[in-house]
Amino acid sequence: MKEVARVHVTEEAKKVIAELRAKHGELMFHQSGGCCDGSSPMCYAKGEFIVGRADVWLGQIDGCDFYIAKDQFETWQHTELTIDVVPGRGASFSLEIPLGLRFVTKSKMFCLKDNETLIATRRGDKM
């Protein structure tokens, strides 16, 4: 069974992650659920944001754990997320903001085959 990634990262975003990692050490991401900056991905120094039982681990981007709130995951579970970076200042606490940049989430629906693989993986089935 081919592993299907739920979250990806662009090359431009990787460059910003490398810059932030050099300054702040290990990083983590949490997909914001609407507070402060809409639904932007938020970058924190690892451990600066407390992950709880109401958060779902989606995978890693460029070596950084990526989480999303469980209720938001229920809405987005059928979408593939790609983290990118754009010029502009968001209104968040994310580490890239002082650089005059902001991370953004681009999404697209999983194709039927990928969605079936994700469902089978969650159940522990072998395809």
Image (cartoon, helix red, strand yellow):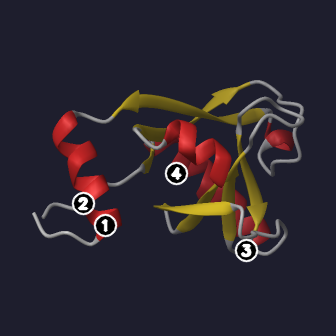
Q: Secondary structure at mark 1?
A: helix
- Point out residue 44 in the picture as x, y percentages from the top left corner: 77, 60
Q: Give the percent coordinates (x, y) of residue 2.
A: 16, 60
> Hey, what amino acid is under mark 3?
Gly
What amino acid type is highlighted by mark number 2?
Ala
Q: Are marks 3 and 1 in contact (CB under 8 Å)?
A: no
Compared across the picture, whether 113 is left or right of 54 comes to: left
- Say if mark 2 contacts mark 1, CB within 8 Å: yes
**In 3D space, how far apart are the residues under numbered discs 1 and 4 (Cα atoms)?**
32 Å
Screen quadrant of the C terminus:
bottom left
> On the image, which quarter does residue 64 sit in?
bottom right
Residue matched to label 2: 120
Q: Residue at x 87, y 42 (%)?
A: 98
Percent x, y for residue 38? Answer: 78, 29
- Give the residue pinned by disc 3: 25
Residue for badge 1: 123
Q: 59 and 26: which one is in front?
A: 59
Q: What amino acid does circle 4 point to? A: Lys
Q: Earlier in the sequence, mark 4 or mark 3?
A: 4
